[in-house]
Amino acid sequence: MTVAQASDIPRLAGVATVVADHSWPACLADQIAAADRALDEVLGVVRLGWRRRTPDPQDLLQHVAAALRTETGLGVVLNTSALHEHRLGDILTRRDLAALVPYDNRMMLAEAASQIPATAELDGSLIVDLPDCDAEMVITTDYLARQFPAARPHPARLSEFVRTLLTGSWP
């Protein structure tokens, strides 16, 4: 069996230092390298307004929420802890998207409660974008959906909405 050292795996220097005393079976090293290359897949060109900057997670989520409300007519409730800061370049890759949306929450349709969930037990603050009329349903993350009376899965993930906002193209 061929064995590769952790330091042989590109871009995993931080991991390599943690496991420097361990050897990887060659097949595992190949799989890790393939996964690393897959993260470099280009997802699209970053729109000018987002290019070469580090978007504030709250600002980015406010734009996502406004786009979702406009598109669906439903209220939107998102938690700022769902996104992390990450510097964008001219091109959006899977690696960039994973850094921005590390948890990649599943989106949920939830019954709109008379009150928005309390944030005391939540990580981060909330972005709430409600339509002018009373909405019976809101779009939220699976993390927040536990706070609402009833919820069912939405077919998309948060990363898909962030990608669409940043590149203008749906996955």
Image (tube, helix red, strand yellow):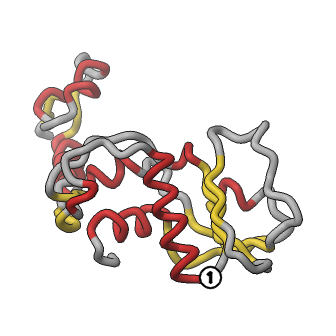
Q: How far across and down, in percent of the image, does residue 110 sit?
A: 74, 71
Q: How far across and down, in percent of the image, does residue 85 sit?
A: 38, 40
Quadrant in which residue 7 is drawn: top left
Q: Amino acid at mark 1?
A: Gly
Q: Nearer the viewer, residue 110 or 94?
A: 110
> Dot 1: few (<14), some (14–19), or many (≥20) neighbours within 10 Å?
some
The furthest residue to the front:
132
Q: Is 106 above or below relative to 61? A: below
Query: Which residue appears at 52% of the width and 68% of the height?
Result: 66
Left/right placement of residue 154 relative to residue 8 reads right
Secondary structure at numbered mark 1:
loop
Query: Which residue appears at 14% of the width and 40% of the height?
Result: 1
Q: How far across and down, in percent of the image, does residue 42 sit?
A: 17, 63
Q: Is 72 above or below relative to 150? A: below
Q: Which residue is mark 1?
A: 73
Q: Nearer the viewer, residue 30 or 158?
A: 158
Number of callouts: 1
Left/right placement of residue 125 relative to residue 111 reads left
Query: Which residue appears at 36% of the width and 67% of the height?
Result: 165
